[in-house]
Image (cartoon, helix red, strand yellow):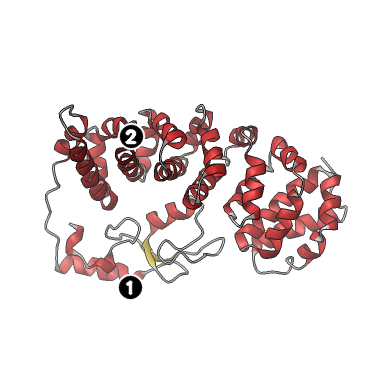
Amino acid sequence: MATQFPDDFKCPISLEIMSDPVILSSGHTFDRPSIQRWLDAGHRSCPVTKLPLPDNPSLIPNHALRSLISNFALVFPPKPQPYPEPQALISNLTSPSSCLDSKLDSLDQLTKLSKRDSAFRRRITEAGAVSAVLNCAASDNSGLQEKSLSLLLNLSLDDDNKVGLVAEGAISRIVAALQTGSADSRALAATIITSLAVVEVNKATIGAYPYAIRALVLLLRDGKGRGKKEAATALYALCSFPDNRRRAVQCGSVPILIRIADSGLERAVEVLGLLAKSKEGREAMERFNGCVMVLVRVVKNGNSRGIEYALLTLNSLCCHSEEMCAEARSEGVLDLCMGFVEGDNEKIRRNASSLVRVLSGGHSMR
């Protein structure tokens, strides 16, 4: 149905006709549910331009476009288009007689169709696609595994599927891909975890699964570019659940995160901000020689979100350790904070003001 509408009526994320178009500060328009999921996952860049966004991006209703879409639908009512029959594609994935190329082609078709159509995603889920795709994800063939994970990622976009995928055993396949898959498979697996962790109950389930967090930490340590970033994003999503902070620290994440933060990946600083809320996280940071120095470099040179979380982390450390306070003072943190207390960014201003009170002796050690 959507193909009869102009492309400008389609959301750049879901590729579906927008029902509630909103304008991002980048100037691009998205369907509200799609861009909200993007922001809720922790992204702070425009999906189209990749340019940074404010910490609390505003979504402005695009009333003109909404009216155009409504009027277009009245003048040119869409003709229902028959969906391709998904059962044949799914059966091809499970048939012992299907060759590798045939399975790859079926996965390509299912992935392409499910990416742009939530109704098709529901249909193939109801037709039993999940178990078939999970079996393919266990394949030793890297191409088959990667395409299976791409389809799983599409299926995970719908909130109704997030818990269902976990219930059907998706985590075991995802963790296996994280441990032994190709570079692309490992990055995809981490992205799926981020998507599934939008649901609170899944954060606990994934975190408690053997080797899940450890596999993410190893990808954070050993992965390249995209793999590192996706691993850090997944850890950020999981570590909003308190028990997972302890697990991440026990897996040795803190030294890795500090080194990566120092190399410029500011998502690592965001994870440190969450880990610093736990006693185990703070103790691990205190043991790392130069932790405060790295955080100060982020405060001096980072973007607004990096500065916010570096200040948050320093706050947590200094609230609980006079030694950390002394080190922060010697690194000039007090003067840096004074420069932020009159700034426009509310979160940075709040974190800086709190840290000023701590460093000035107005907060007792806990």
Work out whether residue 217 or residue 62 is closer to the camera in this orientation and state it.
217
Callout 2: helix, strand or loop? Answer: helix
Work out whether residue 183 or residue 137 is closer to the camera in this orientation and state it.
183
Position of the N terminus, as image quadrant, is bottom left
Residue 100, percent from left and from top: 21, 36
Residue 175 to residue 268: above or below: above
Residue 283 to residue 229: above or below: above
Q: Which of marks 2 and 1 is nearer the N terminus?
A: 1
Amino acid type for the residue under numbered disc 2? Ala
Residue 364 in view: no
Residue at the spot x=67%, y=42% of the render? 255
Callout 1: helix, strand or loop? Answer: helix
Q: What is the quadrant of residue 320 in the picture?
A: top right
Residue 215, percent from left and from top: 51, 35
Q: In this view, does 111 lie to the left or right of 182?
A: left
Residue 331 to residue 120: above or below: below
Q: In this view, does 280 lie to the left or right of 73?
A: right
Q: Bin the neighbour count of mark 2 within 10 Å (Cα to Cα): few under 14, some 14-19, many 20 and up.
A: many
Q: Please report contact status of discs 2 and 1: CB closer than 8 Å, yes or no.
A: no
Amino acid type for the residue under numbered disc 1? Ala
Q: What is the quadrant of residue 10 in the picture?
A: bottom left
Q: Bin the neighbour count of mark 1 within 10 Å (Cα to Cα): few under 14, some 14-19, many 20 and up.
A: few
Residue 139, percent from left and from top: 32, 32
Residue at the spot x=28%, y=68% of the render? 8
Residue 249, percent from left and from top: 64, 36
Q: List the residue tagged with mark 2.
A: 137
Residue at the spot x=38%, y=55% of the render? 34
Position of the C terminus, as image quadrant, is top right
Q: List the residue tagged with mark 1.
A: 64
Q: What is the quadrant of residue 309 in the picture?
A: bottom right
Q: How far apart are marks 2 and 1 (CA)?
A: 44 Å
